[in-house]
Image (tube, coloured by chain):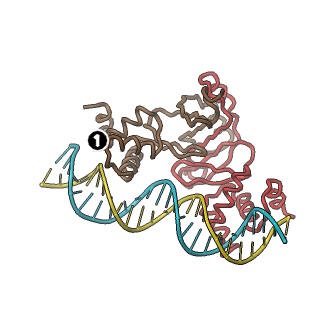
Chain colours: A red, B brown, C yellow, D cyan
Amino acid sequence: MTNYTVLLKEYNLKVTPQRVAIVEELYMNGHMNIDELYQKLLAKFPSISLATIYKNVNAMIEKVFLSEVKLPNTKSVFELVKNEHAHLVCSLCGNIEDITLNVQSVLDEVATISKFEIDSTNLVLSGLCPNCKH
Amino acid sequence: MTNYTVLLKEYNLKVTPQRVAIVEELYMNGHMNIDELYQKLLAKFPSISLATIYKNVNAMIEKVFLSEVKLPNTKSVFELVKNEHAHLVCSLCGNIEDITLNVQSVLDEVATISKFEIDSTNLVLSGLCPNCKH
DNA sequence: TTGTGTGCAAATTGTTTGCATCGAC
DNA sequence: GTCGATGCAAACAATTTGCACACAA
C-alpha cells in the first residue's frame, strides 16, 4: 500500500487509480492548475475525463485535503494541504515556491487596528525568482 | 466636470456615462463583484449590457486604474487602485474591509530566506467581522 | 469627422450535472 | 452485492468577440 493510498484513506476518500495519480502529481509538482493536472493524468489514463478531475479536486477540497490557491493574473493552482504558508510567485516564469513566514506581528497589528477576528491568512507575494532576475 | 470624469481622463479613458457610473459605484461601495456592478448600473442604464461591464472593467484594469481582488470561496471583487493594503474578509457576511498594514518585517524575512525579489504583496485575511462575532 | 464605446447576439471557455456502467470495498 | 467513482454528453455559467450603430473628442 503506497503512501498516497494511506493518505486518501485517512481523508475518507475511496482509493481509485485516478485519485492516487492526482495526489501523486500534486505531491511531485507542488502546485498545478486544472489543465496541468488533466494533461498529466491523460498520459496515464488516456480516457480520463476532465469531469473526473473536477469531481475529485472538489471532493478533496471538501475533505480539506487539497486547497485552491488563487493567484493574481493567472489561473488557480491546487496543492496538498499542509501547514499554513505563503506563496512566492514569479511574475515572469510563473514558478511558485512555498515559504513559511512568521506573520504574527502582522496579525497583532490587525488586532490593534480592527475588530476582526482573523482565522485564516492568505498571502501571495509576486516578484522575480532567482532565475528570472537576470 | 465631476471628480470621476477627471479621474477617467487622467487614466486616458474616454468619458462615457457608463464609465462614470462604474467609477462612482466603486468609489461609493469600495468593492463590488461583476454582478453587483451590473445590477447597480442596470438601475441607471436599463439597456446596459454585461459585455459593457466586462469591457470597461478590463480596460480599467489594463490602465491600472482598477484592480481585481481574488478572494477565497467567493467571486473576485474589483476596487479602485489606491495605496497597497490588505483585505479583511468576513467569512460569515462577506463584508470586506481595507486595512493598511506594515508588512516590512515579513518582506525582510522573505529576503533572508529566499532569493525572490518581491514587488507586490497580496494579503487577504479571513475571519469574523465585529458584527458577526456575536 | 474620426475613432472608440455600446449593446446585442453569438462564440468561446470553464465548470457542473445526469446517467449508465464499472470498480472499490 | 452495494454504493460510490468514472467517463461521456449535455447543461450551465462566466467571459469574450464581432458587428452595426451611437456618441465623445
In this rendered view, identify the residue nearer to me: B23 or A43.
Answer: B23
Question: How many numbered markers are drawn?
Answer: 1
* Residue C24: percent from left, percent from top: 81, 67
* Residue A115: percent from left, percent from top: 62, 24
Q: Is residue A26 above or below residue A113?
A: below
Left or right: where does residue D17 sit relative to residue D23? right
Left or right: where does residue A10 sit relative to residue C2? right
* Residue B43: percent from left, percent from top: 35, 41
Report if residue A42 is visible in the image.
no
Left or right: where does residue B113 sit relative to residue B34? right
Residue occupying image coordinates x 62% and y 30%: B132
Q: Is residue A85 above or below residue D22?
A: above
* Residue A37: percent from left, percent from top: 65, 63
Q: Which residue is mark 1?
A: B17
Q: Is residue A1 above or below residue B105?
A: below
Crowd rating for badge 1 (residues with CA inside 10 Å; few <14, some 14–19, many 20+): few
Task: Please identify the quarter of the rendering in which residue A104 is found.
Answer: top right
Three-letter code for the amino acid on which mark 1 is drawn: Pro
Report if residue A35 is visible in the image.
yes
Residue occupying image coordinates x 53% and y 33%: B85
In this rendered view, identify the residue nearer to me: C1 or A55.
Answer: A55
User: Residue furthest toward the right?
Assistant: A1
